[in-house]
Amino acid sequence: MTSADYEPASLPDLLPLYYRRLFPFSQYYRWLNYGGVQKNYFQHREFSFTLKDDIYVRYQSFNTQNELEKEMQKMNPYKIDIGAVYSHRPNQHNTVKSGSFQALEKELVFDIDMTDYDDVRSCCSAADICPKCWTLMTIAIRILDRALREDFGFRHLLWVYSGRRGVHCWVCDEAARKLSVAARSAIAEYLSLVKGGDETVRKVVLSDPIHPSIRDALKVVERYFPQYALHDQAVLGLKESVDKVLALVPEDILYGGTDSREPLLKDLHTYFESEKNPEKRWGLLRGCATTKQGTLKKGQHFEKEIMLQYCYPRLDVNVSKGVNHLLKSPFSVHPKTGRISVPIDLRQLDKFDPFDVPTISLICAELDRPRVGEEEEQVPKEKDSDIDAAERRRIRDYKRTSLAKYVKVLDQFLDGVALSNRGELLKKSDLQKDF
Amino acid sequence: MQFPVRQRRLIANPKTELYVHFLQFYGQPPLENISLSEFETFAVDRLKLLKTVENSGVSQVKGSEPYQKKLDKEFSNLNFPNKPDIKEEDKDGPNEYEKRRKDHISHFILRLAYCQTEDLRRWFIQQEVDLFRHRFNRLTSVQKSSFLKHNNLHYETVGLVEKTALTDKLVQSSYAGSGSKVDTQDYYKVPFQDALDLVRNRKAYLKAGYVYIPQQDIVITVLNDFRTQLSKALALTARSLPTVLSDERLQPLLSHLSHAYVGQDYSIQKNMGKISLEQIDPLSGKSFPLCMRGLHQALRENHHLRHGGRMQYGLFLKGIGLTLEQALQFWRSEFTKGKVDMDKFDKQYAYSIRHNFGKEGKRTDYTPYSCLKVILSNAPSQGDHHGCPFRHSDAELLKQKLQSYKVSPSGIAQILDLVKGMHYQLACQKYFELTHNIEDSGFSLNHPNQYFLESQRVLGGGGKEAKAEPPQRAPDVAAKPPLDPPALAEMAEDLDAYFQDG
């Protein structure tokens, strides 16, 4: 069974199966309930569903995990988005006095989309991705993850593959969920470096001194640059690509800085004619940069700017800014590719392959596999009446499919969050002298 | 920045707790009853104080000795708190407490008076921010920390060990930090939510959710937040204003406050009717600023002006003293020389002229446009003659125009230089100096009607009418002292700031 077996037309048949037997509802609820620390946190959360025939419904909310399950199994949404936690139950927002219904909290989110890199990737464009350009996502995750953790002090980050051409980050710390619009926008700006649209040639401008977070980002980029840019993307290979790179080199380096306009450029061009090796070409370019840095003239960091322009994460500030912004939910299905939006295990980041992510058709097919090595893991025999039969069965079910390891990533993430919560609850109860 | 709403107001000794510091953020409005006369006195005194702040800021470099001395004197005269170090016994004495209470209450009263329009708000915020900066800088390091802590601003000083370990990063993060400066000054750690501007622009080192700010930059953060908070508060105040204004006792006082002291608007004329229509042509060459001279010329040549031009020039004429009847006659005679016949004029244009004088519609007596308004709003397009020629004219055209007005080549060069630096009002001032043949205009230009009055003053009043007197506004609006370069530059900077904001 290959993922290529997925047909969008089969969704109506696969979705009911997915939601009845595979969707990890208990982990999902565990996540969004956040340990029950805040009252009604789950009940006031907005979900939106895209149903068959592109029918879009907003302001869905649920009182319990059970209700969530029943509704989803009834509606079989093609897409699920998660919104904010509001001041009232979203599904009752029409009964609330206008102006009182407010979005209060939400995770801080980031959306990295491969199409934003179209001007710097030569292998694909638009919605396509391939192993060659996927490195951009790896780089983006490494840089942003470090910055969010080390610079901002966030600890609970859930990185998720979007299902087609990008990744999302959900920052779930309590402090993150309570951030204002201004704060979210400031964080997004802090993390943004590549600015400008089609009409801007030079999209990264560095000035002295270079901020520590950019230095850290450069360290990551330099690790991947030779393989990714010089080799996979061949930025110094084809003439067209070379020209694009040279457009980012300051004029006085290209033209020698005095009235003699041609010599250096001719040299670079001539050099490139005889020297095809991209590494050597890049070496020369860096050499020029190092010389220039000694002179304190403007544009002295151009080789860094080139690397950053080709590799630094490009995020959509608008997605991160809004408290009420809806973002695709983890474990949602991507209708076009059939792939499940799965969490990414950062410990295995370099090995992550988007083409290996299971599709809904794959995992549904895996359900029908004959049970091999029945019950590798015993479902703990707790009070049986508490976990009903369907749930127990479902726990066994997803474990038999390729989805298992991704649910595990979510589990481990949630364990981390719970640990923090326990700390919080303890602190709170200590303060209240509740022993 | 979060100014947390204090849930509990249980204070041991209300008097001492409420005004612990001589400086405050004005987070909580006063909750007591006061007499009307106290209301009025407090408000007027604070206004005088803010006026002094404004004048001092224009004539001296902010923060310099003379600046501080001047403000301190005014503080004492008007009974506002100005000394952070009061001996412990005195601090809680009625005197200091009274001063701080006055400070608190007067601020909130003025909020009511200055929340209504953009201009008022901008002025009020500017002065309050300068005032706050002056007082904050009076505090010692220790007092600053104590003040910030008292206001729940978690500015923690970075310990020596940590600072040394982070020296490289601190140096790399801001322009201010060079190796030696990191050693010699304190750094503060602030939760990043409280220093968003520094975060957004990557202007400081960020670690584990804290921004590391050098001492000298802390006041910027604090001021930014003060400004933002005040701005929001004024917007809120404006919404509840109608309720306040419905109190008949307060309404007259509040309008008087907001109109009287923000600077001249040249709308009420003492010299109304002292200009005759025949004088306008010669006056336009001698005493009109370049913009109005150009508009007048265009009107004479084309026997027409479009709406923007009619507004800008028409209100200016009202400001120099034209009566409604004169205005109607002036415009009608000019327009009917062109394509407009009497009837059409009466139908289409007369109404709006009367409107300008407050005789129609909502009866607002429109005020002549200030320089800022002319420069910043309603840019002219094809066929328009309004706007500020220094701002809106192409450099070549401007040069030609100045040449035709017989301005010397070196003078023109100076003017063009100023224009290049976006100092439009200074360019106009230079034009004033060149056309009046004086070294120093002696005033700081911000209004076309001011140009006219100053010109008349220099020329000794010319014409058969008596010298046009500056309209009497507030008692303390005297001729401003000549500006020195730093102050000029700072004013120009303010204008630049408008442009940079896009």
Image (cartoon, rainbow, N blue to C red):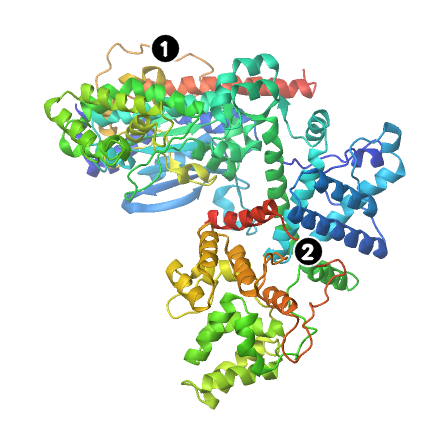
Q: Amino acid at mark 1?
A: Gln
Name the foreground residue: B285 vs B136: B285
Up the image or down, A53 lies above or below A70; here it is below
Q: Is residue A52 above or below residue A350?
A: below
Label 2 element class: loop
| Quadrant position of residue A71 | top left
Residue B72 in the image, given as x and y percentages of width and height: 77, 41
Side (left or right) of A273 relative to A178: left
Give the chain of mark 2.
Answer: B
Q: Does residue B23 appear left or right of residue B338 in this picture?
A: right
Numbered circle sitting on residue B480 = 2
Closer to the camera in the image, B87 or A38? B87
Q: Chain of mark 1?
A: A
Percent from the top left, x then y, of residue A49?
A: 37, 41
Separation of marks 1 and 2 at Cα, in angstroms: 89 Å
Residue occupying the point 67% across, 72% down: B468
Circle 2: residue type: Lys
Q: Does residue B358 lie above or below B228 as drawn?
A: below
B346 on left or right of B449: left
Please tell me how crowded label 2 is: few (under 14), some (14-19), or many (20+) other residues with Cα within 10 Å: few
User: What residue is shown with label 1?
Assistant: A378
Quadrant the C terminus of chain A occupies: top right
